[in-house]
Image (tube, grey):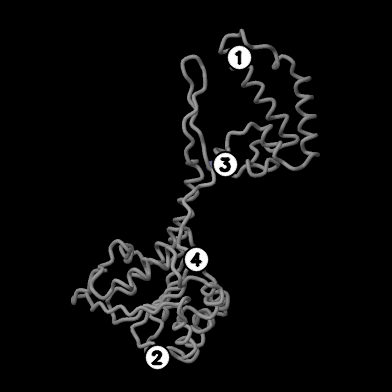
């Protein structure tokens, strides 16, 4: 992994004529149907194919409107009303850009000539993107009280620099893909885990934050209710970007330790980005996990040495 991210957006040509679109379709059979329909159409409506060069603008426009309207109707027999640019034989999911992703504003000058503006990202598709982003963030499981826990708001005090840099690198491209943040309570490990998940979600990843004890409680509850606990475990194992907070806590049972091992092993095998935090010594973690975390190039252990800088009084979140 180089950490280099391509910002180039593949530009598709969203303004092809229907004919061009249909030409792109592979089916010769389809093209034959299309050409036959066009021939029939021209024969059926000779009044729409007159020489209109000397007609007044209004009359020309009326003919064009009528011709388009009737042609679309006719096309309905053989083709989608609004063919997708990606596959002309099916309807476009976005009727604004016809799945091209770009639209070109068109205006008309005083002589009725079309003026084409610069292509801009399709506002309709972008609205869908916003909705997807909103859903990704909702899925991430970051409580509202932590909405300010971002990389920007992180207090980069002495001793926490490496933790901050590593958490950020995990999202934006690092040599490792498993990050274990160790250190005492309240020095910002959880803040970094929230920030990483939020940023990963923003980057388009399916990302999830889980407080490990809560995750165990959820699984126990599901087992009690026979409510697909395995499905939940599989989801945690496979999610694109995972933060597990407080993995080494005092009452870790063999069951919990085994589960943690299963999750981490799976994520190692799948090279899935994972950030884990603990305020315990690494020696309290299951042995196989200890050696996993020491696997340099794959995992990184960072000791966050910043002191507890939370206000002594309980902060109003
Ligand atoms: Zn669109």
Residue linked to disc 3: 12
Foreground label between 2 and 1 = 2
Label 3: state its secondary structure: loop
Q: Give the mark nearest the N terminus, 4 or 2.
A: 4
Foreground label between 3 and 1 = 3
Alpha-carbon span between mark 2 and mark 1: 82 Å
Depth check, front residue: 218 or 189: 189
Checking the image for residue 284, the label placed there is 2
Foreground label between 3 and 4 = 4
Foreground label between 4 and 1 = 4
Alpha-carbon span between mark 3 and mark 2: 54 Å
Residue linked to disc 1: 60
In the rendered image, the vertical position of residue 235 relative to residue 249, given as above or below: above
Depth check, front residue: 192 or 60: 192
Q: Provide residue 272's location: percent of width, then percent of height.
A: 51, 71
Residue 87, quarter of picture: top right
Q: Residue at x 45, y 79 (%)?
A: 296
Label 1: state its secondary structure: helix
In the rendered image, the vertical position of residue 203 relative to residue 65, given as above or below: below
User: Count the marks: how many?
Assistant: 4
Residue linked to disc 4: 1
For label 3, being within 8 Å of ligand 1 is answered: no
Alpha-carbon span between mark 3 and mark 1: 31 Å
Q: Report if the CB atoms under discs 4 and 1 are less than 8 Å apart.
A: no
Q: Provide residue 245's location: percent of width, then percent of height.
A: 39, 77
Q: Give the mark nearest the N terminus, 2 or 1.
A: 1
């Amino acid at each position: 992994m180089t950490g280099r991210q391509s910002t180039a957006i593949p530009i598709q040509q969203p303004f092809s004529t229907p004919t061009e679109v249909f030409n792109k379709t592979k089916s010769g059979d389809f093209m034959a149907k299309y050409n036959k329909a066009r021939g029939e159409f021209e024969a059926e409506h000779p009044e729409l194919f007159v020489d209109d060069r000397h007609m007044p603008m209004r009359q020309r426009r009326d003919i064009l409107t009528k011709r388009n309207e009737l042609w679309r109707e006719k096309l309905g027999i053989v083709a989608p009303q609004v063919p997708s640019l990606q596959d002309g034989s099916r309807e476009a999911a976005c009727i604004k850009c016809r799945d091209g992703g770009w639209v070109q504003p068109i205006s008309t000058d005083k002589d009725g000539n079309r003026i084409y503006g610069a292509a801009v990202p399709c506002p309709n598709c972008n609205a869908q993107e916003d909705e997807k982003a909103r859903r990704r963030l909702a899925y991430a499981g970051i409580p509202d009280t932590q909405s300010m826990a971002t990389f920007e708001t992180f207090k980069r005090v002495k001793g926490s620099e490496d933790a901050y840099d590593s958490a950020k690198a995990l999202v934006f491209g690092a040599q490792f893909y498993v990050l274990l943040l160790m250190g005492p309570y309240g020095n910002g490990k959880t803040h970094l885990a929230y920030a990483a998940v939020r940023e990963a979600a923003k980057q388009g990843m399916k990302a999830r934050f889980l407080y490990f004890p809560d995750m165990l409680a959820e699984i126990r509850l599901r087992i009690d209710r026979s409510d697909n606990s395995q499905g939940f475990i599989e989801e945690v194992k496979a999610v694109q970007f995972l933060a597990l907070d407080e993995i080494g806590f005092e009452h870790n049972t063999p069951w919990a330790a085994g589960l943690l091992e299963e999750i981490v092993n799976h994520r190692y095998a799948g090279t899935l980005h994972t950030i884990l935090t603990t305020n315990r010594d690494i020696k309290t973690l299951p042995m196989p996990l200890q050696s996993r975390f020491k696997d340099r190039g794959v995992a990184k252990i960072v000791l966050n040495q910043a002191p507890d800088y939370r206000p002594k009084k309980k902060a109003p979140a």
